[in-house]
Amino acid sequence: MSLHSRARVSLFVCVGMVLGGVGGCGRAGGPEVYYVTGVVTLDGEPVRGASVRFSPSRPEGIPASGMTQADGTFTLNAQAAKPGAGTATGEYAMAIQKDVVPDISHLEIGSDDPRYGTPAHEKLVEEAMAVKPKAIVPVRYNDPETSGLRATVGKSGNNFRFELTQKE
């Protein structure tokens, strides 16, 4: 390919990149999102390490999630938005979940263990597979349909408090 041809191809690539960046693939910059924070407590105590999910009630909403810190606080991260950006305005149903997997290290064996590959090993694997996570946050809060938790995200003042209880 001649120098002239390479320059022409480079020019077309550059023009294409510029036009693609300006034109985009739909809405310029995507939907507006607003900062959303909150706190989760269970029977008055902060919940650390819980997943908080906002599920939009309308198609215009953007699913978002966050993880609670030691003091129960969280910051939402909308899908396809920069971290901590929040989510779009609108009505949301929430799910909050925290499970703990019991310690099964006593069931693990290495390939140098004489039980490796034997029926005893198979039994240990079956026991490990049967271990179920323990729900720290009651299961009813794990699904936006059953949690009873709702929030309206606006353009400001989006700080929510979710006070969960062990009781029904």
Image (cartoon, rainbow, N blue to C red):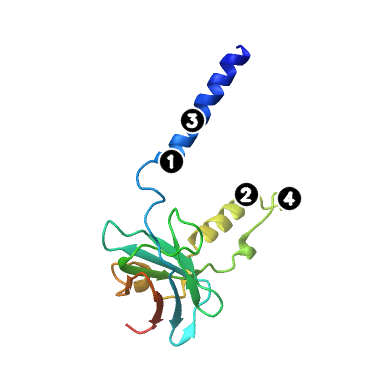
Circles 2 and 1 in contact, beta carbons < 8 Å? no
**Residue 118 marker:** 2
In this view, the mark in front (4 or 2): 4
Please tell me how crowded label 1 is: few (under 14), some (14-19), or many (20+) other residues with Cα within 10 Å. few
Name the residue rendered at 54%, 74% in the picture. 69
The residues bearing labels 2 and 1 have C-alpha atoms spaced at a distance of 63 Å
Name the residue rendered at 50%, 57% in the picture. 82
Instruction: Classify mark 3: helix, strand or loop.
Output: helix
> Is 151 situated left or right of 11 in this image?
left
Counting the numbered discs, the total is 4
Which of 20/100 is in front?
Answer: 20
Which of 118/51 is in front?
Answer: 51
Residue placed under numbered mark 1 in the picture: 22
> Is 165 situated left or right of 59 in this image?
right
Residue reaching furthest to the left: 58
Please tell me how crowded label 2 is: few (under 14), some (14-19), or many (20+) other residues with Cα within 10 Å. few
The disc, 3 or 1, on the residue closer to the chain's N-terminal end is 3
At label 4, the amino acid type is Asp
Q: Classify the position of the C terminus by image quarter.
A: bottom left
- Name which quarter of the figure residue 137 lies in: bottom left
The disc, 3 or 4, on the residue closer to the chain's N-terminal end is 3
The disc, 1 or 4, on the residue closer to the chain's N-terminal end is 1
The disc, 4 or 2, on the residue closer to the chain's N-terminal end is 4
Name the residue rendered at 73%, 50% in the picture. 112
**Residue 15 marker:** 3
The residues bearing labels 3 and 2 have C-alpha atoms spaced at a distance of 65 Å
Q: Position of residue 134 (x, y in %)?
A: 47, 71
Residue placed under numbered mark 4 in the picture: 112
Instruction: Classify mark 2: helix, strand or loop.
Output: loop
In this view, the mark in front (2 or 1): 1
